[in-house]
Each structure stands twice: as C-alpha cells, then as structure tokens.
Image: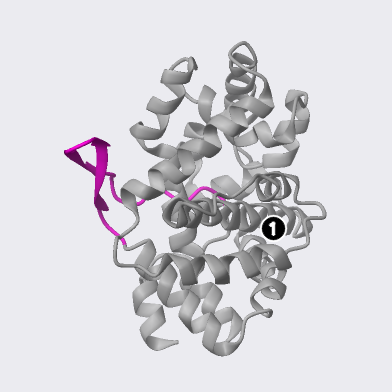
Amino acid sequence: MEIFDCLAVVARPLHDFGDEFMSDEATAAVGLRAGFPPGRCFYCRGRFGVLGEAPVPVVQAAQGFLGPHLVTAGWRAGQAVMPAEEAAACYAQAVPAWGRAHIAADVDVEHFNRLAQQLIDAADGDALPLFAGWRALPCGGDDPVGAAMQRIHVLREHRGACHLAAVRACGLSARAAMVLNLGAEQATHYGWQGPHPDTGGLLPRYRRAERLTDELQAPLYATLTDRQRTEFARLVVALTASGTHERTTSTAPGTHERTTTSAHAQPVGAGVPPGGQTAADRLGTA
C-alpha cells in the first residue's frame, strides 16, 4: 500500500476512536472520581496537562482548535484540583482503561503496537508540543491492549498537531478552520463564541491544509514497507471497528459487565478525510 493510500484509510478511524474515548461518560467519570468538577475540566487539565503549568494563552496556542472560552474555563478550574503533571497522569490512566473496554478482543494488538511505535518513534516533534508531551509519557508494556489505545491517542495528537500547523501555513486561523470543517453552530459548541469570521472563498485553503497534513505525516509512514502499511491499515480498521464497541471487562473476581460507547463523534479539526467511503471501503480499493 502506498503512503497516501494508507493515510486515507487510517486517519479518520484513528481520530474518531480517540474522540469516542474523550467524549465518553466513562472517561468523564474518571475525572469526577479524581475530584474534577463536571464539564470539560478533566478533559482540558488532563489532555493538556502534558504541557506543564503553562499559562492559558500557551495552552490555547499549543492545542489551537478548541475555543479560548472553553479552554480557559476548563484549565483554570482544573488548577484547583491537582497539578498539571498529575492531571496528565490521571488522564493517561483513563486511556488504556477505555481501550481495554472497547478494543475488539480478536485484533492482533501486539503487531499493531510494533508498527504504531515505529511510526511514533519516527516522528519529528518540533513545533508539535502536545504530541511531544504525550509521546514522552510511559506506555505500559504489560498491557498490550491498553498500550494500543495509548498509541492511538498519541498518533491522533500527532495528526492534530500537524493539521494545526498546516492550517496556519495555508493562511487560515484555527477558528476559521473549525467553522469550515464543522459549521458555525458546532464551532460555538467547541468554545468559539460568535460572531464567526466570514469563511466565504476559504474552502480551497482548507482543502490545501488537509493535503499538507498528509504530507507532514508522510515521513512517518515512509518508515514502513508497502506490506507493513497494508497490515497497519487493516489492523487500524479492525481495532477501531465502526459502530458501537463492546467488550467484556472484569470488575471483580467472578463478575463481569458489558460496556459500550456511542457511535463515532463529530471530527474536530484534525484534517481527517471527508466522509463518504468508510475506512474499510478504502482498504478494499487501495
């Protein structure tokens, strides 16, 4: 499989599966148990905690796509709960736990982990602070399923950071990119308060940013052989199988519960390919 064919297959499922984790009530419940108030506090303090005790404008600049109203409120509320490093560690514990509950049991996660780690190791973290922060966190070697979910999250952060760089390089603001990608109503939902900028005539720039995002990720995928890219694409499709995921998880000796998550969340400014064909469709034609 060629590099850009592989990216066309994996970009959306990696992004959407990560979105499912971040938007799941089970993830929010981890934050509540840790003392975070309801809302986006745990999300902001946990996900962006890898940046350290940064001022709000620095956090805003590093993540880009969420509006400053949302980020300011979430980050500041979280400061009263725990230090940034501890919040990031708490969020990082939620990542593999969610993966254990939702990754299909019959996927070869060991092989996925080898290929995904090869991509992550090959990435240049310059100008990608959120990705670099998440890559620096330890990844549990004794929990292959959880480690697979953590690597999905890290790869998602890489594409998101590349897309932010691409958007700015193409002359768009992060706010304009959100309006172009999701519409004004959803941009408001993600923290961008109106009035929104006039984006008429800017769609070609956004399409160019999507292509540039692929180009920025291409060096990672160039480290895989054609065969490895095909294997990686098939593993991503299987691991993030669309629709409702369900896996038996142990809750106490001798007991089990079934856990589910909703269908894929709306993509948030990460340069994923437009809808239409599913990843499985693209895999079948690549």
Q: Is residue 257 left or right of residue 121?
A: left
In this view, the residue in front, 118 or 63, is: 118
Q: Residue beneath label 1, please?
A: 162
Taking the magenta stretch, the answer to whether it contains residue 252 is: yes
Task: Estimate the x, y position of residue 8 in percent, counting from the top left.
Answer: 51, 74
Q: What stretch is highlighted in magenta?
A: 242-269
Give the residue drawn at x 71%, y 47%. Answer: 136
**Are there few (<14), some (14-19), or many (20+) residues within 10 Å of tag 1?**
many
Task: Estimate the x, y position of residue 254 in percent, counting from the top left.
Answer: 17, 38
In the rendered image, is residue 246 in sight?
Answer: yes
Give the residue drawn at x 69%, y 44%. Answer: 130
Give the residue drawn at x 75%, y 53%. Answer: 168
Q: Which amino acid does label 1 sit on?
A: Cys
Q: In this view, does 139 lie to the left or right of 37?
A: right
Say above or below: 9 vs 22: below
Color style of the picture? one colour
